[in-house]
Amino acid sequence: MNSNTPPAASPGAAGAAPAPRSSIVTDASEFLGLAGPCGRLLGLDVGTKTIGLALSDVLRMVATGTDTIRRTKFRDDARQLLDLATSQQVAGFVIGLPLDMIGTSGPRVQATRAFARNLAALTRLPMLLWDERLTTAAAERMLIEADQSRKRRAEVIDKVAATLILQGALDRLRTAGPGASSSAP
């Protein structure tokens, strides 16, 4: 089982080194080396109001949308994510990186990177930042084609987007070799 929280430094230990942080990478091969070849991955579609969640199977073949967290304080959001990661024995996180259409970073990318850095301070689990361009639009199209009402689409769009993000990463991880990248800067 993976440890999701770094060991606490002993109280009063002079010059104690900071707790280990997880690695945040954009390279699929590097992530594979950190997370290992099997074990569940947790996909995140981080928005300003919600976080869509998807979970892979242990063999990393299929992503399944699981839930949507309504965002509150970061600490509460992180606790929910880490509790889920612990209960599902997650080996790593795949976090959607909302690059714009020409691949550059805007305010949403900066907010997502900050979220990943803050989460990394609380866990040793590796994180893959995955280019998520057009996943929300694709999720919306899928739900419209499935004849979902506007209300129902609003309820599930984030976890469907998280599923698409995670499935894209899973597909790439299966073929990951040296230099395999999500093309995220």
Image (cartoon, grey):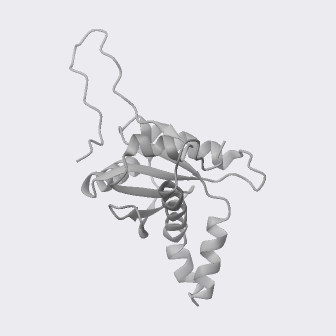
Among the 4 quarters of the image, the one containing residue 125: top left
Which residue appears farthest toward the top when viewing the image? Answer: 14
Task: Give the vertical position of 138 relative to 59 (above or below).
Answer: below
Which residue appears farthest toward the right when viewing the image? Answer: 102
Q: Is residue 13 left or right of residue 107?
A: left
Among the 4 quarters of the image, the one containing residue 168: bottom right
Residue 31: percent from left, percent from top:
47, 44
- Relative to the observer, which residue lies in front, 85 or 56? 56
Q: Residue at x 27, y 45 (%)?
A: 2
Q: Is residue 174 left or right of residue 48?
A: left
Among the 4 quarters of the image, the one containing residue 67: bottom left
Residue 22: percent from left, percent from top:
41, 36
Q: Residue at x 25, y 56 (%)?
A: 87
Q: Residue at x 57, y 55 (%)?
A: 48
Q: Residue at x 48, y 68 (%)?
A: 159
Residue 52: percent from left, percent from top:
48, 63
- Relative to the observer, which residue lies in front, 85 or 72? 85
